[in-house]
Amino acid sequence: MSESHMADLAERASAVLATVGRLGTMLSGIVGERTSRLTNAFRAEVRRVASALALALVAAVFAIAAAGFAAVAVLAAMWDTHPVLGAGLLAGGFALLAVIAVLLVRSATRPAEPHR
């Protein structure tokens, strides 16, 4: 091989290596940007879920308080005439609410069936 041919091959190899380097830099930038976006989206989703859980807990506390006050009101209204019936109705109502809650949790946590 001639010396000019070797120099031409060396220039081409250098150009290919420079192109590969620029391509690697570009891909690294793209991956870094996508990773940053994914991290930000994940953090926003975690904040959203934490906020929803906190609000659900507050709602549950108020619902329990409302149920308690309603139970006291029913017992107070029925205490003079039918105290046992009032207590039985309250117990049955709370049992019904518990069964409904168990069924809702069961349906919400059941694994999804695969699409056919």
Image (cartoon, helix red, strand yellow):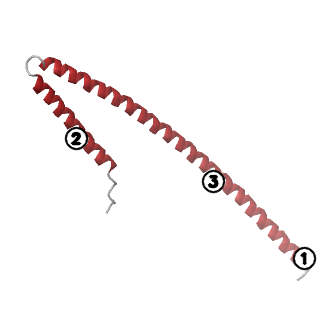
Query: In front of the other: label 2 or label 1?
Result: 2
Task: Work out whether mark 3 precedes mark 1 in sequence or the reverse, and give the earlier one.
Answer: 1
- Distance Cα–Cα, label 3 vs label 1: 40 Å
Percent position (x, y) of residue 75? 17, 21
Question: Label 1 crowding class (10 Å Cα cut-off): few <14, some 14-19, many 20+?
Answer: few
Residue at 78% x, 65% y is 17
Question: Label 3 crowding class (10 Å Cα cut-off): few <14, some 14-19, many 20+?
Answer: few
Q: What amino acid type should be assigned to the residue bearing mark 2?
A: Val
- Distance Cα–Cα, label 2 vs label 1: 88 Å
Q: Relative to 6, does residue 59 appear above or below in the rendering?
A: above
Say which element carries label 2.
helix
Q: Pointers 2 and 3 in contact (CB under 8 A)?
A: no
The residue to which callout 1 is attached is: 4
The residue to which callout 3 is attached is: 31
Q: What amino acid type should be assigned to the residue bearing mark 1?
A: Ser
Percent position (x, y) of residue 87? 15, 27
Q: Quadrant of the C terminus?
A: bottom left
Compare residues 42 and 93 and report the one nearer the observer. 93
Compare residues 111 and 12 and report the one nearer the observer. 111
Percent position (x, y) of residue 30? 64, 53
- Distance Cα–Cα, label 2 vs label 3: 50 Å
The residue to which callout 2 is attached is: 99
Compare residues 108 and 2 and report the one nearer the observer. 108
Left/right of residue 86 with respect to residue 38 in the rendered view: left
Compare residues 87 and 19 and report the one nearer the observer. 87
Query: In front of the other: label 3 or label 1?
Result: 3
Percent position (x, y) of residue 28? 68, 55
Q: Relative to 81, does residue 49 appear above or below in the rendering?
A: below
Q: What amino acid type should be assigned to the residue bearing mark 3?
A: Val
The image quarter containing residue 19 is bottom right
Task: Work out whether mark 2 precedes mark 1 in sequence or the reverse, and give the earlier one.
Answer: 1
Residue at 11% x, 22% y is 83
